[in-house]
């Protein structure tokens, strides 16, 4: 039984406290300014392309030192300044009351306070602004996207959401897995017998893995990323890695998008450069590699124009400049063919769990 | 001169055959043109006598039930000076009778249009014209007339006289017209005429009985135009030839009438000898006329008396060869007599025969030419200053006309003959018509093209009652609205070339431009006289005027923009600051809201930071 490593990671409760304290500081600062007849302002780290840099030390994209000031003194910024202040106020309520909402909710909630967003993209942008101001992902604000992914395996959690405080749950009780939603994201991780986390790109394979008892055979927690992993899922993977000390491996389709799904889990995306604690720097990409396609004689389909263009794009990314990441891109570009995870079914439905997975896990010990 | 040249085709018939040129091509255009001609004549008549015009225009259908085109009664009544009863038949019953032949600014050119309208009415309806006139404030004469087109003569059907109370003229014709189509243009015409004639009161009653009344806005009349001499730059060879001919000496026909004239001027009662006649003439030389001087000079050289004069015919006076050639009726043979250059009469004869010297001709017959300029010009044109204009050959005349065009030291034409409306009346008219939030007017200094002086005055108006439906240009020339053919007009060209965004004007602005060109000759592009050609001098003046006014408008727009911005600021800060305070109070965990009133005030006041 692996217990949580309390010294190295923050608990859900600690993170909540930190957030509420940040919000209060912002509130006090605005309050003081108003009282003294000064124009309050937010300092927002710039998210422009020129300010996004790759940090080799922490192995993720981060924002540079440039920042923008959104001032209530500037008439053209007054509206968006007020929107941002409203969002901080609204998030404060959400977090204190333990309620969750979606991006769409925020757009509509604003109207009750005569804060009018022209459209949802505008309110989504203000949410990203607040993430940057507070360096916290929106999931901590209790704001969730519609997309959901799932987790299954021997992991005990303890809820912190209102009405469930202290209640514990084991995530191997339900074979379809558990939604990684607001309550799971805010739950404390208590203990686990697992020794490994397998993140898998597709829901179909996730179900196969559960049926084939991969969690038992490999002492694994299985996470369905449902394509590109949502932030709450990435955050859970990180917590499993840092709080529970579990290594994370990733299985994705054998194409350039699969490779990048693995990369984003490992080192984040440029879009989230203003955030931390969404990456698992030690995560390992098991496959499907370009070289695996030939090695395992997988049935393939030809790449499209956009697949190839995506390869060229990623070749410019600093993280693809060396090692296996670089090599696999080159091979993809050479063979111009791709293979999905389901391709293993040609050799039997359990071929992927019986043959491929063990072989790749063995191989992964050497990289 | 023989009379056959004119009797082959009468002017009336000529115009009848060419009525398209004069704007009478169809019932729609004809109705509109007739309105214009009568209204403009009425306004011109009032202008000349400095009478504040009171114009009544009415158009009535003869039979309202009939479909267009149909017969209409068009009546225009004014409070002008009226016309002497003896001139009325000729003025309204013949073509080419008019008083507007001088070089000055006037609405119509020769006063022919009214006769054309009368002619058109008679041709299409066979109804006479009715003219009522009172010129002395006591008697009112009414004529009912037809035009005899073949003979170019009025046929008076009726002439009555009764008591009148004030001066004025009323002309009424019946003509075929199409008001359903012409109505819009006629109403536009009356509206725009009132705008450019703010000192007039104009009433228009349309066929439906609806009245459009435009009251007088200003009580001051602009200075009337004066008649002036031509400017050298505006002259061609043919004009010079005509000017020379009418100063140039023609050998007087010596008949009984002439001899009586000589006797009368010299005050002769009885027969005297040639010597006595000459002595008498010497005493009064400066008082006697040129032809008489010439006759006296001839008598001195031929040494004959009046009886002798009657028996001869002077054939040639050749100054170069110093001889006079004459035909003696009695002897039936030709004689030549030598002229004595020492005789005091030689000089008189020479100057009369050969006309003025070039210097005298230029200074006397042209504006802007003084003796100094004339001498300079002669140097430039390589003519001797004392060259006699009567001795010039055809080639020399062409050379002279050419040089007059090219010589650049003549002062610009005298604009005193022009009568622009003036900035104040124009501005008042614009204010009254459009009630704009901003208006500016500017009258440029006089300028000239090809020897014709012109003045551009322009007004600009923005906002107020002007609908936001885009830029509207009102074009006027010599106080006449130009309504047709605006596409190719020089004013439109200038307006369209202007980059309005530079003057803070965007989209479909509530913007009006009033352009008035005054000139002794407006350079119209077509005979329709509705669009002005793009002469570079005119284009430059228009452009300068428009740019000046547009800059003023831009200043207004910035000021207005700043005001709007301040209001917007105030609204925004009053709306948002209380919200920010509400959010901050809860975020900070406070009970009481901060005092943010100061910030709202500051927000409304601070300058926009760019």
Image: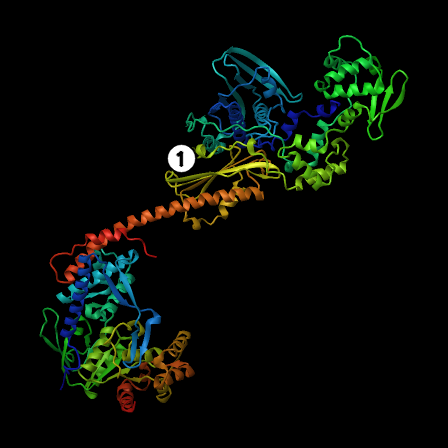
Protein chain holding label 1 = B
Total number of numbered discs in the rendering: 1
Q: In this image, B553 relative to B567: left or right?
A: right
Asked if one can make out residue B131 in the rendered structure from this viewpoint, the answer is: yes
Frontmost residue, A232 versus B38: B38
Residue A94, how many percent across, how many down? 16, 65
Instruction: Tell me if mark 1 has few (under 14), some (14-19) or many (20+) residues whose alpha carbon lies within 10 angstroms of its own.
Output: many
Identify which residue is drawn at 38% across, 46% down. B557
Q: In this image, A97 relative to A366: left or right?
A: left
Identify which residue is drawn at 62% across, 23% down. B97
Residue A163, how many percent across, how many down? 9, 69
Relative to B30, residue A191 above or below:
below
Frontmost residue, B312 versus A130: B312
Q: In this image, A59 relative to A90: left or right?
A: right
Residue A273 placement: quadrant: bottom left
Residue B130, how many percent across, how many down? 54, 18
In the rendered image, the quadrant that contains the C terminus of chain A is bottom left
Residue A259 placement: quadrant: bottom left
Frontmost residue, B411 versus A333: B411
**Residue at which label 1 appears:** B431
Frontmost residue, B265 versus A18: B265
Asked if one can make out residue B235 in the rendered structure from this viewpoint, the answer is: no
């Amino acid at each position: 039984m692996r217990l949580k490593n309390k010294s190295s990671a923050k608990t859900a409760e600690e993170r909540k406290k930190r957030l509420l304290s940040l919000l209060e500081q912002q509130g006090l600062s605005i309050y003081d300014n108003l009282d003294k007849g000064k124009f309050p302002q937010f300092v927002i780290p710039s998210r422009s392309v020129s300010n996004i840099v790759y940090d080799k030390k922490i192995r993720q994209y981060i924002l540079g030192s440039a920042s923008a000031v959104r001032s209530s003194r500037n008439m053209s910024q007054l509206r968006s300044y007020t929107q941002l202040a409203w969002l901080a106020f609204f998030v404060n309520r959400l977090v204190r009351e333990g309620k969750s909402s979606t991006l769409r909710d925020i757009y509509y909630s604003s109207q009750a306070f005569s804060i009018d967003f022209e459209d949802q993209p505008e309110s989504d942008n203000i949410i990203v602004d607040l993430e940057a101001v507070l360096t916290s992902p929106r999931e901590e604000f209790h704001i969730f996207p519609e997309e959901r992914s799932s987790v299954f395996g021997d992991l005990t959690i303890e809820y912190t959401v209102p009405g469930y405080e202290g209640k514990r749950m084991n995530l191997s009780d339900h074979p379809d897995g558990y939604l990684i939603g607001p309550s799971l994201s805010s739950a404390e991780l208590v203990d686990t017998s697992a020794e490994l986390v397998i993140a898998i790109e597709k829901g179909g394979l996730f179900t196969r893995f559960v049926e084939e008892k991969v969690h038992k055979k490999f002492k694994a927690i299985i996470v369905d990323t449902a394509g590109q992993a949502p932030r709450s899922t990435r955050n859970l993977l990180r917590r499993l890695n840092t709080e529970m000390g579990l290594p994370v491996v990733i299985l994705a389709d054998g194409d350039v998008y699969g490779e990048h799904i693995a990369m984003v889990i490992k080192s984040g995306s440029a879009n989230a450069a203003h955030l931390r604690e969404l990456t698992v720097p030690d995560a390992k990409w098991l496959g499907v590699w370009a070289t695996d396609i030939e090695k395992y004689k997988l049935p393939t389909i030809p790449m499209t124009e956009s697949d190839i263009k995506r390869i060229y794009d990623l070749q410019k990314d600093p993280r693809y400049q060396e090692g296996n990441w670089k090599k696999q891109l080159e091979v993809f570009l050479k063979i111009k063919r791709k293979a999905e995870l389901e391709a293993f079914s040609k050799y039997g439905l359990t071929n992927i769990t019986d043959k491929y997975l063990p072989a790749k896990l063995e191989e992964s010990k050497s990289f | 001169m023989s009379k056959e040249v004119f009797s082959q085709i009468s002017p009336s018939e000529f115009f009848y055959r060419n009525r398209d040129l004069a704007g009478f091509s169809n019932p729609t255009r004809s109705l509109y043109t007739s309105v214009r001609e009568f209204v403009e004549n009425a306004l011109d008549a009032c202008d000349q006598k400095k009478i504040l015009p009171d114009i009544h225009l009415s158009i009535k259908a003869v039979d309202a039930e009939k479909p267009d085109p149909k017969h209409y009664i068009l009546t225009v009544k004014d409070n002008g000076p009226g016309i002497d009863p003896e001139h009325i038949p000729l003025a309204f019953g013949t073509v080419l009778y008019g008083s507007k032949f001088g070089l000055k600014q006037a609405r119509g050119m020769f006063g022919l249009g009214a006769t054309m309208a009368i002619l058109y009415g008679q041709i299409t309806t066979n109804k006479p014209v009715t003219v009522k006139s009172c010129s002395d404030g006591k008697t009112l004469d009414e004529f009912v007339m037809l035009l005899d087109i073949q003979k170019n003569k009025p046929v008076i059907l009726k002439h009555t006289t009764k008591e009148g109370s004030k001066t004025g003229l009323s002309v009424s014709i019946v003509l075929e017209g199409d008001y359903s189509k012409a109505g819009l243009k006629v109403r536009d015409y009356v509206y725009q005429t009132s705008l450019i004639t703010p000192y007039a009161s104009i009433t228009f009653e349309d066929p439906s009985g609806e009245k459009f009344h435009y009251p007088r806005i200003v009580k001051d009349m602009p200075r009337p135009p004066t008649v002036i001499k031509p400017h050298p730059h505006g002259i061609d060879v043919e004009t010079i030839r005509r000017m020379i001919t009418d100063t140039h000496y023609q050998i007087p026909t010596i008949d009984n009438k002439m001899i009586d004239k000589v006797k009368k001027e010299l005050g002769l009662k009885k027969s005297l000898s040639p010597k006595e006649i000459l002595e008498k003439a010497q005493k009064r030389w400066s008082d006697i006329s040129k032809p008489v001087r010439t006759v006296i000079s001839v008598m001195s050289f031929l040494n004959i008396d009046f009886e002798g004069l009657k028996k001869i015919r002077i054939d040639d006076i050749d100054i170069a060869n110093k001889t006079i050639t004459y035909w003696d009726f009695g002897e039936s043979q030709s004689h030549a007599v030598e002229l004595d250059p020492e005789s005091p009469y030689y000089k008189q004869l020479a100057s009369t025969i050969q006309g003025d010297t070039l210097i005298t001709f230029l200074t006397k017959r042209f504006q802007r030419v003084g003796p100094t300029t004339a001498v300079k010009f002669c140097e430039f044109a390589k003519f001797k200053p004392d060259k006699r204009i009567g001795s010039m050959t055809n080639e020399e005349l062409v050379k002279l006309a050419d040089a007059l065009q090219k010589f650049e030291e003549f002062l610009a034409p005298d604009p005193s003959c022009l009568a622009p409306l003036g900035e104040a009346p124009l501005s008042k008219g614009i204010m009254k018509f459009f009630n704009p939030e901003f208006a500016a007017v500017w009258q440029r200094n006089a300028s000239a093209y090809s020897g014709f002086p012109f003045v551009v005055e322009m007004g600009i108006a923005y906002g107020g009652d002007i609908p936001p439906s885009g830029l509207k240009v009102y074009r006027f020339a010599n106080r006449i609205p130009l309504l047709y053919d605006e596409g190719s007009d020089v004013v439109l060209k200038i307006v369209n070339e202007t980059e309005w965004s530079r003057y803070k004007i965007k989209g479909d602005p509530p913007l009006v431009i009033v352009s008035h060109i005054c000139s002794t000759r407006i350079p119209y592009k077509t005979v329709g006289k509705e669009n002005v050609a793009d002469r570079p001098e005119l284009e430059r003046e228009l452009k300068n005027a428009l740019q000046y006014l547009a800059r003023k408008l831009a200043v207004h727009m910035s000021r207005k923009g700043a005001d709007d911005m301040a209001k917007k600021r105030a609204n925004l800060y009053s709306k948002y600051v209380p919200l920010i305070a509400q959010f901050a109070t809860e975020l900070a965990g406070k009970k009481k809201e901060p005092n943010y009133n100061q910030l709202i005030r500051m927000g409304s006041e601070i300058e926009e930071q760019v």
